[in-house]
Amino acid sequence: MNFTPSTRTKNAPWYSVPFVWLLIGIPATSVIVGITMFTLAVRSYDGLVVDDYYQHGKHINQVLARDEAARDSFLRANLFFDLDTGIVSVDLSGETIQQVEKLSLSLIHPTKSGHDQDFFLRRGPDGRFHGNMSKVNQKRWVVQIETPVWRLVGMVDLNASSTMELLPSIAP
């Protein structure tokens, strides 16, 4: 018996066989997706990872003590943001504000530490604290006003309002 290829089956070139493209396509797609994911990971650093968790955990009691000091002094702050001029005004009330001449104000981005802004506010002749902030691109911030003794923290959405009230974050 003579085994010769029939005339009905042709030797088609490899690139015209769909199964070959399926075998090539799966690893090729995986390589392309992997390169894309690596590029995104390198370009979009999120800045959320703390280098030393132990040291960070030890400082939580100091932070809570500052929040408790704000509560015990009955501190309250009303903030006014003028986005056109970049001026921030703070009307601070409480028991220990007479000796405060300078405040630290931090605008903390909720997810990217590279966008955070820190600046100082000085007491003006009107009794309010004033300072200049740089151009604010994002509209939602964690706002923190502090001295070495106490701090007030809250969230502000500058799309909704250019004013906010900060109260101590620890309930009595």
Image: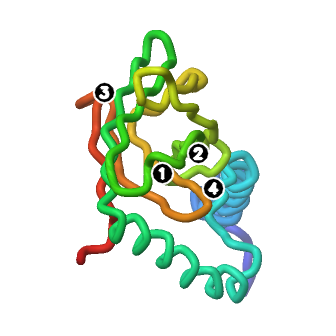
Q: For the residues carrying marks 2 and 4, which lies nearer the camera in this image?
A: 2
Tell me residue 98's x, y (percent).
Answer: 46, 46
Check if mark 2's residue and mark 1's residue have beta carbons within 8 Å. Answer: yes
Alpha carbon distance from label 1 to label 4: 21 Å
Please tell me which of labels 1 and 4 falls first in the chain: 4
- For the point 66% across and 79% down, the residue is 56
Alpha carbon distance from label 3 to label 1: 16 Å
Q: Residues within 10 Å of mark 2 (few under 14, many from 20)?
A: some
Q: For the residues carrying marks 1 and 4, which lies nearer the camera in this image?
A: 1
- Residue receiving disc 1: 144
- Residue receiving disc 2: 104
Q: Is residue 171 above or below residue 136?
A: below
Please tell me which of labels 3 and 2 falls first in the chain: 2
Alpha carbon distance from label 2 to label 1: 8 Å
Please give the label number shown on residue 46.
4
Alpha carbon distance from label 3 to label 4: 27 Å
Tell me residue 116's x, y (percent).
Answer: 61, 44
> Based on the displayed image, in which of its 4 quarters is residue 28 positioned?
bottom right
Amino acid type at mark 4: Asp
Q: Residues within 10 Å of mark 3 (few under 14, many from 20)?
A: some
Tell me residue 97's x, y (percent).
Answer: 44, 49
- Residue receiving disc 3: 162
Amino acid type at mark 3: Ser
Q: For the residues carrying marks 3 and 4, which lies nearer the camera in this image?
A: 3
Specify whether residue 81 is in view.
yes
